Image (cartoon, grey):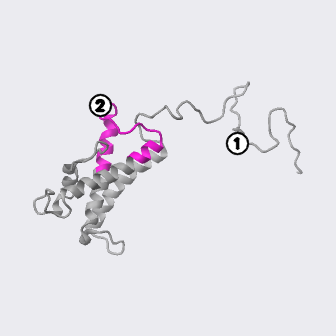
Amino acid sequence: MAVGANTYGAVTGVQARVGDLVPSRAFSGSTTPTTTQVELFLDDVASEMNALMEGAGYTIPLVAGTNPSAHAWAASANEAGASVMVLDTHPDVSYDPDNPSPQASRKSSYAAIYKRFLTAISEGTFKADRDTTKMGRFTVGSYLDDDGKKKVPVFTRAMNDFPGSIERVTDA
């Protein structure tokens, strides 16, 4: 099995991070996890990344020629997320919050790389091509009135506040 077409990382990237878990520093059919399992981890992590990117309106999969920086970051996050899953296959290096160790902090650092990527997508700070076919022509926000001042959006106005209405009098 090979990694899917929508996967950004590679087994070699995971080996560079956590290859020391296996004697030859290279995953194979006889290691724990096997190469096939590592490829599955890469595919699983990439599926989550792609689902979030698609939900946020990005064009998926990211293309290295169009978005080289975004693609490189996606590959790094994909490999870091898969590395966390590989570390989970070894009970002796699983994270224990009551007993921090170098292995635990290593896992936390890979998890942080992956989480930072997912956070950038959800916050809209991830810079890549966006799909404009579904909702790309809709704009959200206030328009300017005749005086050049920003109007308050309709959905935040009080029920009786509309253009031409009389302002409410409040007791002082």
- Residue 8 numbered tag: none
Identify residue for label 2: 65
The percent coordinates of residue 138 (x first, y second) are 58, 32
- Residue 43 percent location from the top left of the image: 30, 51
Total numbered labels: 2
Label 2 vs 1, first from the N-terminus: 2
- In the shown orientation, is residue 29 left or right of residue 155? left
Identify the residue under disc 1. Answer: 155
Of the pair 119 and 170, the residue shown nearer to us: 119
At horizontal 19% and vertical 60% (from top left) the residue drawn is: 34
Horizontal side, residue 67 vs residue 143: left or right: left
Q: Which residues are magenta?
A: 50-78
Callout 1, which amino acid?
Phe
53 part of magenta stretch: yes
Res 106 quadrant in image: bottom left
* Residue occupying the point 29% across, 35% down: 64
**x and y percentages locating residue 162 in the rendered image:** 80, 36
What's the residue at 59%, 33% (across, down)? 139
In the rendered image, residue 31 lying in the magenta stretch gets the answer no
Q: Is residue 80 above or below residue 101?
A: above
Position of residue 84 measured from the top left corner of the image (x, y, whole percent): 30, 60
Instruction: Count neighbours of disc 2 (C-alpha within 10 A) and say few if under 14, some if 14 to 19, many if 20 or more.
Output: few
- 3D distance between C-alphas at marks 2 and 1: 41 Å
